[in-house]
Amino acid sequence: MTSQCTTSPALLFETSWEVCNKVGGIYAVLSTKARTLQALYKNKVIFVGPDVWSEENPSPYFTEVASLLTSWRKSPALPEGVSVRVGRWNVPGRPIAILVKFNAMYEKNQELYYQMWEKYGVDSLHAYGDYPEACAFSHAAALVIESLCRHMGFTNGEGVIAHFDEWTTGMGLLHVKATLPAATTVFTTHATSIGRSICGNGKDLYAYFSGYNGDQMAAELNMQAKHSLEKAAAHQADCFTTVSDVTARECAQLLDIQAHVTPNGFEKDFVPSTAKAMAEARKNSRDALIKVASTLTGRSVPEDSFLIATSGRLEYRNKGIDVFLNSCNILRNKLTESDRTVVCFIMVPGWARNVRQDLSEAIKLSNNSHGLPDPVITHNLNNYDSDPIINNIHRFAFHNTPNDKLLMIYVPCYLDGSDGLFNGLTYYELLPGLDATVFPSYYEPWGYTPLESVAFAVPTITTSLSGFGQWVNNTFGEKKFTNSAVHVNERNDSNFSQLTEDISQQLLQMSRLDEKTIAALRKTAEKTADLAAWKHFITYYQTAYSVALDSAKKRNL
């Protein structure tokens, strides 16, 4: 463990597209970290996010508070069309959050692109997709930070830390550096844009890793704008961080800069806090999962079935969904008549239109005697013919017939309680009912999903290519599954067959464990999550802040 920051910032801003805006894993990072930051720095912490909400669609994560920053809000000195709402983020710690309405900044983008090319060499010439939106938001966020700093007397930003997450906020960091020269800047990449693109385009990232050049690959994959912005922000920041040793190696190769590693912690605020509450949550979850499986397939799925799931974004290769399906295909051929029934859930949001009406009505009527057509999917898809998961479920001939020992069920929607099937239970409320989870990622800078699993006392399987998997390897050594309830499988560009065989065997062994061993394993999983709590990992951020403050001080001598 490294030394902690001994200097408390006058203000600590953290800017992200996922502040009060749940999109992906960065929301989990910031929302769980908030309570620990709030305890350390009190109301000196201010999160800045996009105001993408309306009266018809209000944010469930944000509560406006009229008494916060009142004098500044009366005259914030922001460009016409840029407005703010100030309140609290509805997460443990309830930190101050400023949501920025930024639509008026689109017309400023061309001027911004030119300025950042002149000052920092950011090449926005080939910008497309979400690049203009990200730049408009982060530019507006930087103006808010600048305005608030000057209102509070930090004219040049002295003692202020401005922390920006991911390439989507890079323009904000560069603006702060230009307009508040004494401010301290921190930039965190949670996954390099070019590394993710290399993998997403089906290229082998690891076999040829030392031969990749980030600038060259950005040109080849039409990623010049995002890569250029991310690289400039990383090099201009007073401290550049990333989430794992896996991604630090990637940054050194593709962004030409060494990053400080700040691992992602977790808080168990969402986890049932007593054995009784956990047992009740597990029962409620299993009842809901088994009811859906029984109704969809038309068979009485046993209560003691072994329930497995994978989840995350629909990145078929990067998230290892291909490995999961192959492993389950091997597993079903290993199951004997005496083995428990295995039910596999793929909880990955696709382009879902709505819940299947026939399934919804059958659940309401408790009618599961005949099963339904296409008994492998719970929701209607807008792109059924091109969705890679449903296509491969059919390719592997998972039919969910009455005689099958292994059932495969695709749940292609966000499990936020409004899916229409699982009694209003969210993903976190369904997790306790599972017996195992599998996240065999190919590209996974950290890996919150396996960490969430062990927090909910569910043993999990991941790979050595995830940051979390490497942390488990480094922390628990050779007997990692016994000591952590986490199987970390070696993964590279050439061992796909061995990997799927190993995972199928691990699942088979777990499904055959006796109740006493399973209970002990679940307790082990919870202890692993405790070691990854923010109270342990926040010191890495404190060190990064200290490094950044020292760098800014030297820069301003």
Image: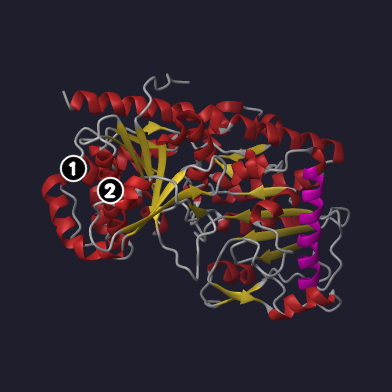
Q: Is residue 72 placed above or below 373 in the rendered structure? A: above
Q: Earlier in the sequence, mark 1 or mark 2?
A: 2
Instruction: State the scheme by which the image is colored.
Output: secondary structure
x%, y% of residue 416?
62, 60
Residue that numbered label 1 is attached to: 179
Residue farthest toward the left in the current orientation of the protein: 118
- Look at the image and say whether residue 551 sits in the magenta stretch: no
Residue 518 visible within the image: no
Number of numbered discs: 2
Residues 231 and 158: in front is 158
Indicate left or right for 454 with 129 as reference.
right
Q: Amino acid at mark 1?
A: Thr
Indicate left or right for 530 with 314 as reference.
right
Q: Quadrant of residue 234?
A: top left
Q: Quadrant of residue 102?
A: bottom left
- The residue that appears at 61% across and 75% down in the rendered structure is 354
Residue that numbered label 2 is attached to: 142
Residue 145 visible within the image: yes
Residues 497 and 123: in front is 123
Q: Tell me, yes or no, whether the two marked residues, 1 and 2, touch with CB atoms within 8 Å.
A: yes
Q: Amino acid at mark 2?
A: Ala
- The residue that appears at 66% across and 28% down in the rendered structure is 479
Secondary structure found at label 2 = helix
Indicate left or right for 507 with 94 as reference.
right
Residue bounds of the magenta highlight: 277-297
Q: Work out which quarter of the rendered image holds the C terminus and state it.
A: top left
Mark pair 1, 2: CA separation: 9 Å
Query: Residue 51 has which mark?
Result: none
